[in-house]
Image (cartoon, helix red, strand yellow):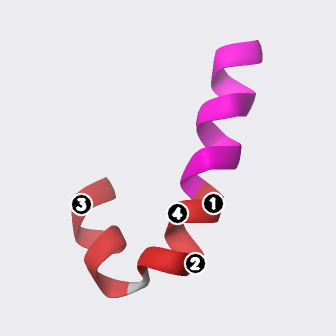
C-alpha cells in the first residue's frame, strides 16, 4: 500500500505518510 502509492505520487504521499506516522506515533 505505502510502496504502491509512493510510486504513484511520491511527493504527495510522502507528506501524507509523514503526517500519518507522526500522528500514530504521538497517538
Instruction: Examine the rendering and report whether any part of residue 19 can be seen.
Output: yes
Instruction: Name the mark on residue 16.
Output: 1
Q: Is residue 4 above or below residue 12?
A: above
Marks 4 and 1 close (CB-CB < 8 Å): yes
Query: Of tags 4 and 1, which is closer to the observer?
Result: 4
Q: Is residue 13 left or right of residue 2?
A: right
Residue sitting at 32 percent across and 55 percent down? 2
Q: Is residue 13 left or right of residue 24?
A: left
SS at circle 4: helix
- The residue to which callout 3 is attached is 3
Q: Is residue 17 above or below residue 11?
A: above
Distance between the Cα atoms at labels 2 and 4? 6 Å
Residue sitting at 34 percent across and 72 percent down? 5
State which quarter of the image contains the N terminus. bottom left
Marks 1 and 2 close (CB-CB < 8 Å): yes
Q: Is residue 11 left or right of residue 7?
A: right
Give the residues in magenta.
17-27
- The residue to which callout 4 is attached is 14
Instruction: Examine the rendering and report whether any part of residue 27 can be seen.
Output: no
- The residue to which callout 2 is attached is 12
Distance between the Cα atoms at labels 4 and 1? 5 Å
Q: Quadrant of residue 20?
A: top right
Q: Quadrant of residue 6?
A: bottom left
Residue sitting at 61 percent across and 47 percent down? 18
Q: Position of residue 15 (x, y in %)?
A: 64, 62
Q: Position of residue 12 (x, y in %)?
A: 58, 78
Amino acid at each position: 500500500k505505502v510502496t504502491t502509492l509512493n510510486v504513484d505520487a511520491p511527493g504527495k504521499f510522502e507528506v501524507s505518510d509523514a503526517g500519518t506516522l507522526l500522528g500514530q506515533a504521538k497517538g
